[in-house]
Structure formats: structure tokens, C-alpha cells
Image (cartoon, rainbow, N blue to C red):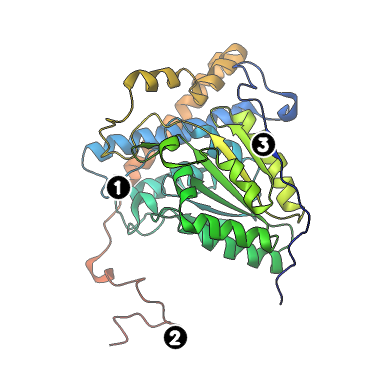
Amino acid sequence: MSAPSPKENEQTVVFALSPQSAAPNVVPAAVADLDLWDVYRAMLRVRRFEELAGQHYAAGKVGGFLHLAIGEEAVCVGASLVLAPHDHLLTHYRGHGWALMRGLDSGRCMAELFGKATGVSGGRGGSMHFADAQRRMWGGYAIVGGHLTLATGLAWAAHVQEPGTIVCAVFGEGASNIGEFHEAANLAATWSLPILFLCENNGFGMGTRSERAAAVPDVARRAAAYGMPAWQVDGMDVADVVAGMREACAFVRSGEGPAILEAHTYRFRGHSMADPELYRDKQEVEAMKSRDPLLRVVAALREIDGARVDEITAEVEAEMQAAVAFAEESPFPAVSSLEDGIVARPDGLSRRSAR
């Protein structure tokens, strides 16, 4: 089948939703149907999972790298509430919350961090490789931007085989400076593929501020080079994320081609657990915590029913403590399975049994 023809004379517009659109006790009319109780439960699940992951990493129970997205929960929660179950999702290595929102079991996710056989990737991938093919969660990827070309391939398959299905490719602003981003964006736009490039712009590429590494720090403005529309949203405001995602996904799902959605957010922890954070002022971090997306939702809900807030908090805490217990009690992968999954064989034989 031939590739679709690129659209001619297409103009690009950057749609900007107001950065401070939602006060703690106000839900904009565009998302009036948003259930803040569900939002609170989801955001708290992500926050507590990551806090406990960090705690057990410090205790030596979690191996490898660990990149936390504490402070960025509004992006993965808000975006996931808009995506459909049949849509494809690919994320970067800061993807614990995306996996939980996609429906992956918290216990199996925690077990993956602990390197246990019951983990979502059998304990072999760790923090950066959460995946579940049945849920079309095609993984976190450790190679910065490397998944964007894969996402474009999935978008081509969806265009051919599954009209109405879109691909959401999540990446950080640092990935927009590498070749794969531009190659993926160009091909997606040329072939009018159904892919949403979702940038979590937390202001830092490892230890470097975005404006020091990018001539155009606003990733949404790069969409103009590829003739696609772009949205910018306040990534510290879940309602703003939902509103922007609804517009962007509707555009992509309509068959008009790809789009970019850029969520400006902020991580409260370092780039990884090994980051001493010598490149930013502690006062800056504390100032940004005043815009904590989780606390904004809590403030709104306590005005409605404080007891219910406490009830949900207790339920989530029980779930996450159970996830840790499951991870600690699970076995490590057997030594005999060391070579499993390394080489795929169409005849079904493993590498070991083929000798």
C-alpha cells in the first residue's frame, strides 16, 4: 500500500490554554465532567508509588536507575483520562505513572523495580522498561528519543489497519533536540499519521536548563516546521491537561494528521536518584511546590468532603503497601532463565534448547 499524500498549503497554529486556568477550587467549563475524586485517587496512586520506590531505592532494594516524576502527575493522569484503551502508548524512562494509569498492576510494577520474576518485564527491565502488550503500553525506553521512530511505525500500522486508533508518544523536551524527533515528526506529517507527540517539558534535560540547550525551548513551536498544529498546556494543572488533550486527540483521531501537545511541568526530585541537584536553587524547587498538582486537587476536595479524602488516601496507602509487600515476597528470576527472551525463534525453541 502506498503512503498517503501530504497535505498542501497547510497552516500551523499554536493553541495556548491559559497557564493558570484552574484555581484550586475551580474546574473550567471545558472539563466540567471531570470527576475530581477519580483524579485524586489516580494522582495519589502515582505519587505514593514513586515515593515508596524512592524510599526502597535508598534502602538498596531497587537496582539500576530510578527516575521519578514526582510533581508531574497531572500530565500522565490528565492525558491518560483522555486516551482510549485501544490507543497505543509509548513513554520515556520516567514512566511509572503512565504504566499505572494504563492499568498495569501496582504490585507487579513494584516487583519489576525490585528485579523480581513477578515484575511486568520479569524483573529484567527495571524502572525504565515497564510494558504490557495487552494494554498497548509498549514500554518505557531508556534511549532518549529512541522510541519516537518506533511510535511513528505504530502510527503507520494504525493508519492502515485501525482507523480511529491513535498513538501517543511521550517524551521529554531534551529528546526534541535529537535526530529521531525530527525524523519522526517529518515522516508523521508527510504521511498524515495518527500520532500525538506529547512533550513533558519539565525545564531540565538532566542537569541543563532547557533554554541553555535549545534555540527554541518551546517544543510546541517546532511543530510549524512540519506543518502540524500544537497545543501548550499547564502541566501542573490536571484540568488544563485534560482540556488540551481532548482537543489534540480529537484532531489526530479525525485523520487530519499528527500534532504536538506540550505540557509545561516541573519535577520536584532530581533527574534520577543519583542526581545531587547542584544545578538548581533549592528555593526554586520549594517555590514550585506551591503549585503541586496533587495538593491543588486535595484543596478543592477537602472543601467538599474531607472525610472522603481521608478514606481514599487510606485505600491508596493500603494498595501501595501491599505492592511493596508483594515485591519483597516475590522470588528473583531463576538462574536457568538467564538467556530467556534474548533471541526470538519462529520455531518456538529457546536458545538453550536449540543447542
Residue 100, compared with residue 140, is above or below; it is above
Q: Earlier in the sequence, mark 3 or mark 2?
A: 3
Name the residue located 30 percent from the left edge and 47 percent from the top edge.
65
Q: Circle 2 is placed at which residue position?
A: 347
User: Image point 63% across, 21% down: which residue?
Assistant: 22
> Residue 184 location, x and y as percent?
56, 59
**Numbered tag placed on residue 65 in the rendering:** 1
Element assignment for label 3: helix
Classify mark 1: residues with Cα within 10 Å, few (<14), some (14-19) or many (20+).
some
Q: Seen in the image, is 150 located left or right of residue 353?
A: right
- Marked residue nearer the N-terminal end (1 or 3): 1
Residue flagged by tag 2: what amino acid is it?
A: Asp
Q: Amino acid at mark 3?
A: Gly
Q: Between residue 130 and residue 210, name the one nearer to us.
A: 210
Spatial CA distance of label 2 from label 1 is 35 Å
Residue 283 place in picture, x, y as percent: 35, 18
In whole angstroms, how far apart are the C-alphas of marks 3 and 2? 47 Å
Marks 1 and 3 close (CB-CB < 8 Å) = no
**Disc 2 vs disc 1: which is toward the camera?**
1
Tell me which residue sits at (45%, 26%) in the image.
314
**Residue 136: which disc?**
none
Place of residue 348 in the rendered image (x, y in percent of width and height, measured from the top left)? 43, 82
Q: Nearer the viewer, residue 249 or 139?
A: 249
- Residue under label 3, please give it: 244
